[in-house]
Image (cartoon, rainbow, N blue to C red):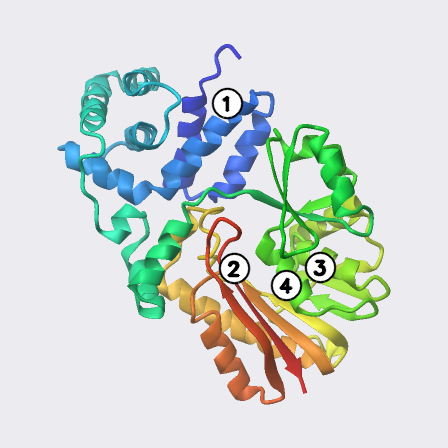
Amino acid sequence: MAGINIREISADTLIEILEHGQFSHIYLKAVLDKYGYLEKSERAFITRLVNGTVEREIELDYIINSYSKTKVKKMKPLIRTIMRMGTFEIYYMDAVPDSATCNEYVKLAKKRGFAGLSGFVNGVLRNISRDKGNLNITDLSVKYSMPQWIVDKWNTDYGIDKTKEILKGFFEPEELCIRVNLSKITREELMNKLEAQDISVRICDSIPSALYIAGFNVISSIPEFNEGLFYIQDYSSQLVPYKAGIKEDDKVIDLCAAPGGKALHAAELASKGTVFARDLTDIKVALINENIQRTGATNITAQKFDATEFDETCENNYDVVIADLPCSGLGIIRKKPDIKYNQTKESLDELVILQAKILKNAARYVKAGGTLCYSTCTINKDENENQVENFLSSHKEFTIETMEQLLPDKEHDGFFICVMKKN
């Protein structure tokens, strides 16, 4: 469209994320919704450029600082953003020749009132282009753009070789995983419907409700999505209700349920039972209700409740309690690349305390013989294995049935699941 500059849109988006602290996955989605009329290729360009610049920020700054006398931290926000974007394009995108990339960012600097710095932008980006690939980056923090304290923590928890695998895993291309609403349609029937629209579909062999899809423009344009025939839900997240062993007549509660994927899946498995999906705010409960209405589930109720508060009406009342708790999110960096820059050692410690508080309440909601399913989307052992160990030390009535730490790879994000039985 005339007058639309996708690099300028990307720059404004990145400034909001990297300079003003907007959450990347939320803000980028809002931008893509706003410019929904753009061509699929243009939307894909914006997504790749924004996400790539965020996820490789540390490496990009290292490269820029190797060629610029003015260090990244000293640059004006717009120029800093332009330099990061230009460097990312030069190193990781091949939509246009490097010379054209440099020209585009020079023009953008001039358009936004920085004509006096256009020569600087041009000179540094062209030097980076000419010398591309000659920097020998061996430091893991720089190479994989991961804050050093996180690399150190994973080295301690997993060892250097496993840490390298984890860091590489975050840069594996990700397919969109969906959960088929098996109460409405079979997986094969949905596959046929999607493939008829030229959407590529791949079966997930290990989960009977899961498919991987690609080749569509926007998810809301797929009729089967609006009809509630499938739900966007990661492989790891789909594992939780299966691992919890939910039976058709079970009474289930999900304590931190928004946007409702696990609770809706639980409602499908507990087809003759009941599910209560709780979360902290009106907005989150409204989101759960929106998904309940779209999928047509009738045995699930969304409720507003603070999971850190004990609810005496729930005591010894549930066959299955799902505690998919607030966590550092260090297993889903691929989806939310800014998470790694926003977490601190102190914030992780605070989350461990919060999780322990909710787990203490959750334990009291489980019937004798019932199941407590604890999960997080992190690979931080203090929130996972160590949290479970501390919980069990003061809750002797529980025993572990299964415990699994998934690490990020092509199939799934980093995720932790522990299923405990109340004796």
From the viewer's perspective, is residue 126 above or below residue 419? above
Cα gap from disc 1 to disc 4, whole angstroms: 36 Å
- The tag on residue 170 is none
Query: Which SS class for mark 2?
Result: loop
- Above or below residue 241? Residue 118 is above
Q: Residues within 10 Å of mark 1 (few under 14, many from 20)?
A: some
Q: Earlier in the sequence, mark 1 or mark 4?
A: 1
Q: Label 1: state its secondary structure.
A: helix
Q: Identify residue type, mark 4.
A: Val
- Of the numbered discs 1 and 2, the one sitting upstream in the chain is 1
Local crowd at mark 2 within 10 Å, few (<14), some, or many (≥20)? many
Q: CA distance from mark 2 to mark 3?
A: 16 Å
Q: What distance separates the C-alpha of mark 1 from that of mark 2? A: 31 Å
Q: How far apart are labels 1 and 3 at the CA level? A: 35 Å
Q: Residues within 10 Å of mark 3 (few under 14, many from 20)?
A: many
What residue is drawn where x is 34% and y is 19%? 112
Task: Residue at the far bottom: name it.
Answer: 396
In the rendered structure, which amino acid carries the disc numbered 2? Cys
Which dot, 1 or 4, sits closer to the camera?
4
Q: Nearer the viewer, mark 4 or mark 2?
A: 4
Which label belongs to residue 263? 3
Residue 166 place in picture, x, y as percent: 39, 56
Residue assigned mark 2: 377
